Amino acid sequence: LPPVAPSQPATAPAAVSLPPAAAGTEGEAPVAAPAAPVPAPSTPAAPAKPVGPNSAAPGKQQIYLTAERIEGTTSVETTAEGNVDLQYGERTVKADRMVYREPLDEAEATGNVKLTSPGEAIAGPHLKLKLGDSVGTFDTPAYSIHAFNSKDTAAAAHGTAARLDFQGKDKYRLADATYTTCPANGSDPDWFARVSNLSLDYTTSEGTARSATVVFKGIPILYSPWLSFTLDNKRKTGLLAPTIGSTSKGGLELTTPFYWNIAPDMDATLAPRVMTKRGTQWNGEYRYLGRSYSGQIAGEYLGNDEITHTNRNARTILHNQDFGYGFTGELNLNKVSDDTYFTDLSTRLSNITQTNLLREGRLNYGGSEWWSASLMAQRFQTLQDPSQPPLAIPYDRLPQLLLTADRADMPFGTEVIFSGEYANFSNPTGTKIEGKRTTLYPQLAYPMQTAAYYVTPKIGFNSTRYQLTNQQAAGTTLPDQFTRNVPIFSVDSGAVFERPLQLFSQDLTQTLEPRAFYLRVPHRDQSILDKPGQVVNFDTSLADFNFAQIFTENAYSGGDRVADANQLTLAATSRIINTANGEELLRGAIGQRYYFADQQVTLNGVVPRTGRTADFLAALTGKLNREFSIDSGMQYNYQDSAVERFNLGARYQPEPGKALNASYRFTRSLLRQIDTSAQWPLFGGWHAVARYNYSFRDKRAIETIGGLEYDGGCWATRFVLQRLATAVGQVNNSIFIQLELNSFSSIGSNPLNLLKRNIPGYGQITNTPADPVFAE
Amino acid sequence: CGFQLRGKADLPYASLYIALPEASTLRAKLVRSIRAGSKTTIADAAASSQAVLGITGDSTVKNILSLNSAGRVREYQLVRTFGYRVHDQTGRDLIPPGQIVLQRDHTFDDSQVLAKQTEEDLLIRDMEDDIVQQLLRRLAASKPDFAAKG
């Protein structure tokens, strides 16, 4: 039951009503509903009786009226005067004078009228209300309304109106009203809207305003003939927070996104972006979701770029489908109109750095527990940087068919493994060797495994057949068909040792996991694939030397070379594990490979390796405590006595919303960079994010970002400054500002996303129209 | 120095149903490790199992780690976030749901896209092995609450 402020004088009222089974204490209104009567206090102060048509009807609300004077005929019209207090359900109406007309179920209150309930507080000079239907009118009220039964009073809307109409439960219409979600603390709100006609529907959580002027800090900033907004921050058709900005390549710009909540399983966003230097870019995104499929279609269109005088556009289609019976499919199609589309028009690193845009369709079949197949068609759009030498265009795979099978528990405890690939490589340039490559690789393993150790000897036979085409155009004279057969033998083995460990009064387990991997691949002459000027390389390069790669069978990734090997790889991992929950806290690893023979197979004419030891690998990753985590790795080259790769990164995150990151990355003769980023709350509602990424090799900053967000309670504003190196000697500067008024633009963003964006995702080429700058 | 060979890492479940597609390689690896390292039996259906291992999320995102002087990506980082829960047949959680986050770095070169895709696939498989190990460690240490079960 709602608390009711005792506003009546301590002297007992002259005549009041009282419910049959309950009584109020002195000076307090009786508020019991018939269904849940308040236990009668020992000293009932005032005689009273229920009035109204529903008084006897079970399950309906009863009306209780208290006042200094009550007179009239109960079933026709009751007039109450002096500190009138009317209780109906959860609503209380107080007024100087009240007339209740029972046949109409209508209460008319005048003089200092105040209507309160858990979701409403409305005050004004005159109210006329049909209590049961909640239909009526409040003249010139000051109101404060939030969703019924909602504890979230922050979402309360309040203001004044020339007239407020009750339109049934939880529905209101206001004429010549002001509206704000800023706290009502007596002072002027930071922002409000002046609206000629405002409708608030808490049954659907929709607000609609006609002829609205938004005033921010006393300054009118926006006029709109129509505005739709959400009352509970759920997704809702309407305008989203606009973004104003300036970029060196686009000039001043304004993006005003519109969100369309089509159905629970589909939505769309449309966002025109006006750029003073280039014109208007139209951005759209449509997303859908079904039981067995999901996807999104997005596009960007700039009709006539005022700088290039061309039509420019980008489009993306992503679709996932589950066909059932083990079949699934994926489409990932991306296209832009020209090479410099992203560098001219995008502000996102993940877009600007894209060079090969994927166009791929896939059909997968998960046949059973032990085999699967996939069919893929793949092409790329290669964007050439005009300031750079042209990049090689990757081969299309039209199509690639993969078949993998792995069946354990075969006779004598063996395991049969098969992997096969058929790929048809073609190159859009038409001037390269093309061809079909078929690889069959059956393997037989004999795994011996317990909880403590495993030993797996394995033997396989890799047979690859090439059928080369387009040799005339490529100017090569290789045989049209040939086959390469390579036997492969390996023994993989490992063990797990454990010991208990006590650190900082925590029960820990330390493991020691040595692993040994012996690999023998006899040399089979592949020089036909690596003749000067006639190199056959569809999809292959030398793989990174890392902890995953050192336990693989081929030093090359891709199927065009099978490296000869007679080598032993040794590694040891030690983990620190929280004994209580099994969580891994920290992991250190070292690895080293020993060669028993020099390398003979080559790729792209690179001089083959000699020497007996490979690079040394070390890594340390994990949490040092709850707040500190580190990630480090090193690759050391004995032959040159030099560090090949090194990275050291640390993160301090004492609580969500507070993070400091710093990392140093080094790759010999390629890369030397530091990258620092931070996210930290400042004073008085301000939050800051920053990133600084500097290249020592190029002596310049790659990306510099500074962002500030102010959370004003009922509004938020964001600023971001970005300086981005887009190509050699080229820098893009941009600044963006966004103002978000609570419950006027619901799908907002937060500074967390600003940082997330700076370690960005991958795949989709178009910007999210809803929030091209600030969103993730 | 106190190290001893690990004993059988028994899971505190008599039988476990793994709610992953039959053809999933992750499922195959889990089944193999559980069979080799514990007494827990793998159930064919959730209805005939004491506990169900469900996946609440498994996503891999690719972040840019570093760029070269021409503004091209030099290194990527793969971050795989794997969420799981163990519940009984009525859907009641037996242990608090958990999450395993793994990351792997790799170099990138726009002129070797296909080979780099293959390397990425290798790292994703490598993370899968890691998930199996870490998940089984956590399951073995977990203390399921069967209390409400009749």
Image (cartoon, coloured by chain):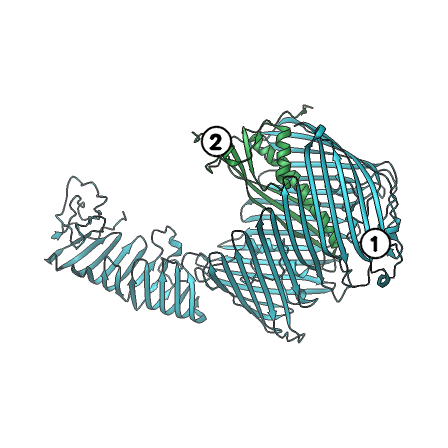
Chain colours: A cyan, B green
Residue A605 visible in the current orientation: no
Q: Which residue is identified by label 2?
A: B145
Residue at the spot x=57%, y=64% of the render? A736
Total number of numbered discs in the rendering = 2
- Give the structural element (helix, strand or loop) at label 1: loop
Locate residue B35, reporting x and y percent: 62, 30
Judge by depth and name the residue closer to the eye, A598 or A333: A333
Q: Is residue A84 left or right of residue A728?
A: left
Q: Nearer the viewer, mark 1 or mark 2?
A: 1
Q: Is residue A678 left or right of residue A73?
A: right
Residue A771 visible in the current orientation: yes
Q: Is residue A424 left or right of residue A64?
A: right
Locate residue A184, reporting x and y percent: 36, 58
Q: Is residue A285 left or right of residue A237?
A: right
Locate residue A460, reporting x and y percent: 78, 38
For the residue carrying disc 1, how many other residues have a C-alpha within 10 Å: few (<14), some (14-19), or many (20+)? many
Q: Which residue is identified by label 1?
A: A536
Judge by depth and name the residue closer to the eye, A413 or A53: A413
| Quarter of the figure with residue A430 | bottom right
Residue kind at label 1, given as amino acid type? Val
Q: Are marks 1 and 2 on the same chain?
A: no
Q: Chain of mark 2?
A: B
Image mark for residue A100: none
Distance from Cα at disc 1 to Cα at disc 2: 60 Å
